[in-house]
Image (cartoon, rainbow, N blue to C red):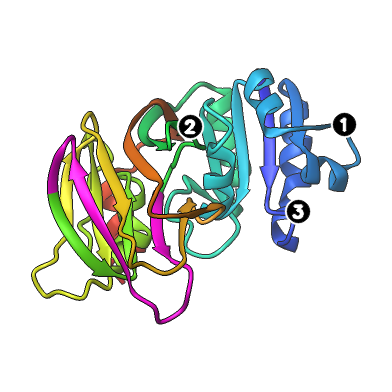
Amino acid sequence: MRFGIVCNPHKKKSLALSKDVYKFLSQHGDVFAEEQTAQFLGITSYTLLELNQKADIVVTIGGDGTIIKTAQAVEKPIFAINSGGMGFLCEMESKYAVEGLERIVDGKYTIEERAKLKVLFNGKRLPDAANEMTLQTARIAKIMYFQLFVEDELIDTLGADGVIIATPTGSTSYALSVGGPIMDPAVNAMVVAPLAPFRLSARPWIVPLQKKIRVTVLSKSKETKLVIDGDYALDVSPKDEIVVTGSERKICFVRFGESFYQMVRLKLVR
């Protein structure tokens, strides 16, 4: 097999574990490391896009942020080892890393597919969102105004700090913190959750992935930003049009059998 490795370069625990992971995988196939990981290991480096081309499975070592960053470019199955905090999306804790890798080598795993969001900005495709696309005010304590459409039908006009459009994966992230529902990853839908809306009746929506959500910023809004997965960002004006729908691309995870509901009980309900 061919493996890729991506670790959080800012965590000593992640870097230290990457040595053990590299040593084990090297005995069972070809190993390709992402640039910062490779620099630490002293081996040839590859971009995330190159890992996606070369590897059969990509191993991430870190937390959910490392996974989401990797998923922006990688469509191959991701085996996520948690060496950070909660690690909600991670399949294995760091102390069981080698045991998990042995199961992969033995073929004792399944692949779970999860949805991404396709984001168009004035017709130009931006990076897909694995967690969420957020439209938010760029000025602290200033409200923004916008309209939400599903297909061509207006569903709301709001004044708020912004709006989150999340995948089922993202439903347990930022969207959850603003009162959005927890969605089973098998549900083909997205959450539309207002951020601090200035109206008691404003509530989250569940919209099918195959439909198009259109967001337009109204002229009385102050500075506004579009942010994808907390990483990619750009400025938005009232002249701009944002369209979000389900992507044809997926995130794929290596799984050993624990259910989504079990993970919620173990990591979110505490």
Q: Indicate left or right for 172 with 191 as reference.
A: right
Instruction: Name the residue carrying label 3.
Output: 15
Q: Could you tell me residue 159's position as x and y percent?
A: 24, 69
Find out whether the residues at labels 1 and 2 contact each other: C-beta distance under 8 Å. no
Q: Residue 63 falls in which quadrant of the image? A: bottom right
Q: Could you tell me residue 40's position as x and y percent?
A: 85, 48
Find out whether the residues at labels 2 and 3 contact each other: C-beta distance under 8 Å. no
Instruction: Name the residue carrying label 2.
Output: 124
Q: Is residue 104 above or below residue 156?
A: above
Mark 2 or mark 3: which is in front? 2
Q: Residues within 10 Å of mark 2 (few under 14, many from 20)?
A: few
Q: Could you tell me residue 43's position as x and y percent?
A: 88, 35
Seen from the viewer's position, the closer of residues 250 and 105 is 250
Instruction: Name the residue carrying label 1.
Output: 44
Q: Is residue 58 above or below residue 204?
A: above
What residue lies at 60% left-to-right and 57% top-to-bottom? 83
Magenta segment: 132-154
Residues under labels 1 and 3: Cα distance?
16 Å
Please name the amino acid that badge 3 sits on: Leu
Residues under labels 1 and 2: Cα distance?
34 Å
Seen from the viewer's position, the closer of residues 54 and 148 is 148
Nearest to N terminus: mark 1 or mark 3: 3
Please name the amino acid that badge 1 sits on: Thr
Q: Residues within 10 Å of mark 3 (few under 14, many from 20)?
A: many
Seen from the viewer's position, the closer of residues 192 and 105 is 192
What residue lies at 22% left-to-right and 50% top-to-bottom? 148
Q: Residues within 10 Å of mark 1 (few under 14, many from 20)?
A: few
The answer to if 147 sits in the magenta stretch is yes
